[in-house]
Image (cartoon, rainbow, N blue to C red):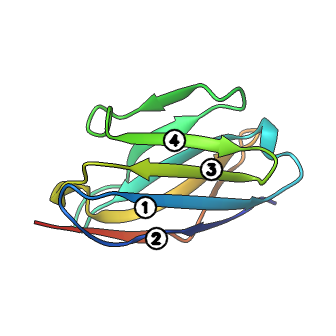
Amino acid sequence: QVQLVESGGGLVQAGGSLRLSCAASTSIFRSILMGWYRQAPGKQREWVARITSGSRTNYADSVKGRFTISRDNAKNTVDLQMNSLRPEDTAVYYCNSNDPLGRSVWGQGTQVTVSS
């Protein structure tokens, strides 16, 4: 079973940057689809970005051009670089993994707060 641990959240002013990191404990990391999701207070969890085992990336329209997802298969990590942050980016950010058998695992989440 994959285990995921996020880090890097915090408080930042609008226009600032943060980098989130997710460490995965698995021997098959390079085969796993990784993604980031977020959930704001009172809202449903929404997809933010994904990166395939072949490092193809996709982004939600709301973050396209501002966020960058990347992975390091040697370190079993996936990062989310967030630039030009807005107050509406405030949320708990979750790392997610999907293995080749379709099994999904979530991290515990990390809080990102963007002040105006």
Within 10 Å of the Cα at label 1, are there few (<14), some (14-19), or many (20+) other Cα atoms?
A: many
Mark toward the start of the polypeptide (1 vs 2): 1
**Residue to which mark 3 is pinned:** 78
Mark toward the start of the polypeptide (2 vs 4): 4
* Residues at marks 3 and 4 touching, judged by CB atoms closer than 8 Å: yes
| Residue 102 sits in quarter | top right
Mark toward the start of the polypeptide (3 vs 4): 4
* 2 or 3: mark nearer the eye: 3
Number of callouts in the render? 4
**Residue to which mark 2 is pinned:** 110
Query: Residue 100 or 90: which is nearer the viewer?
Result: 90
* 1 or 4: mark nearer the eye: 4
> Which residue is located at x 86 percent, y 45 percent?
28
Query: Seen in the image, is 90 located left or right of residue 24?
Result: left
> Which residue is located at x 65 percent, y 31 percent?
52
Residue 58 in the image: above or below residue 18: above
* 1 or 3: mark nearer the eye: 3
* Residues at marks 1 and 3 touching, judged by CB atoms closer than 8 Å: no
